[in-house]
Image: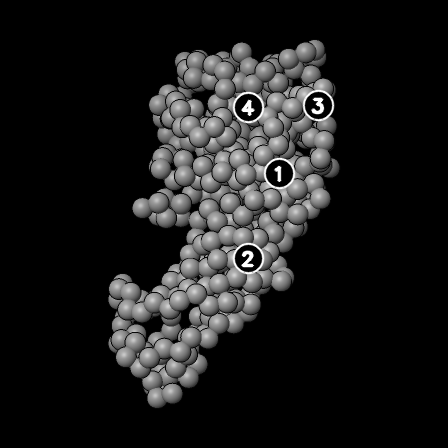
Amino acid sequence: MLALALAALTVGIGDQQPAAFADPRMRSLGLKAARMIVPYDAATSEPDKVAAWLAATRAAGLEPHIAFQHLSSDRCPSAPCTLPSRATYRANVAAFIARFPQVRTYSTWNEANHVSQPTATRPEAVAGYYQELKAACASCTVVAGDVLDSGSYVNWLRRFQAVTSADLWGLHNYADVTYGTTSGTDAVLANTTGTLWVEETGGIVVRRDAAARVLLAHDEARAARAVTAAFTLASTRPRITRLYVYQWQTSATAQFDAGLIRPDGSARPSYAALAAAMPKTGATASPGVTWKASWSKGRLILRGTCSLKPCAGTVKASLRAGGKTIRRYGARQYGTTVKIRVSKTVLTKLRRASVRRVSLTVRSSTPVKASQTVVLKLPQPTLRDLRA
């Protein structure tokens, strides 16, 4: 059941840097969407930045998702901290939609309950913005209230819903996944109806304040556990249909570092955790490897195509006929091709079966350590295979 729930989950990544989307390690993961946070006036204040990001995500085959927030000049909770009027918000988001019609997925306001936003104590205003964004793009998918699981977020959501109803909500559940709880996510589910997207989650490696004082100590193992927890949490709550992991990479001095990749470019354990947790679709069973199965003279041929080189690890195979496992084969080292001799008895059963599958359990050691399972369709063995 867990595998079925994960297969139904759309997984994306949140990152602001266009260069991240060209990294073959990201492209090998099978992500479906990417999320960018922009000021609500981005159509006029930073259109080139948005265009570059959209070009990069398009090249990576990812669905773009834009989340609006405060002006780049705002310094909430200090001054300036400007809450736009409903008319100002309407004019700016309409300009964005007109300038970037390829974007069909939006969040009304990013982390709208956080003190860094002018909307922190004004959920009624965000409810109005949501109505304006929906009206400006009736065919778009729009996340209504997007909250962080800290502070009085439940009351914030209730006040939003006193103004208008919605069927799609957003949550950043860092507290739950960092500390091994579920209360934040469950509270949001209990106080909303419809679908919930986890718009930001992941493993915080280190967090500092503006004076560089450490608020959460550097711990890559904790971050990896958080990534795994995010998927476990989402897969056991069917109203959660989408999850964005944040972020790909940041600088060594960043206040908030949840990067899957270290500042020096090497992969962290959280990258391996993400690779292992990704829904299994198609033939990709390990980071950077795509598998195909065929027959040759009575041997099962498993060919792995590596997009990240070198790649290596072990693979176990189980042959299935008509939904039943008929033969298991122990671990074999792989680089590119694995050949397994199959008995005539097993080949005969497979030849007679209407449905044939091979289930692979792959443990990659290079480029990252990960363990995943993938199921491939098998062609019918030929008479030549039986006679070999």
Q: Which mark is residue 212?
A: 3
Of the pair 154 and 367, the residue shown nearer to us: 367
Separation (CA) of disc 4 from disc 2:
37 Å
Tell me which label, 1 or 3, sits earlier in the chain. Answer: 3
Which residue is disc 1 drawn over?
259
Separation (CA) of disc 2 from disc 3:
36 Å
Say if mark 1 contacts mark 3, CB within 8 Å.
no
Give how far across and how far down residue 174 sits, in percent.
Answer: 51, 29
- Helix or strand or loop: what does disc 2 sit on? strand
Tell me the quarter of the image containing the C terminus. bottom left
Residue 359 placement: quadrant: bottom left
Which residue is disc 4 drawn over?
111
The type of residue carrying mark 3 is Ala
Say if mark 2 contacts mark 1, CB within 8 Å.
no
Labels 2, 1: front one: 2
Which residue is disc 2 drawn over?
365
The type of residue carrying mark 4 is Glu
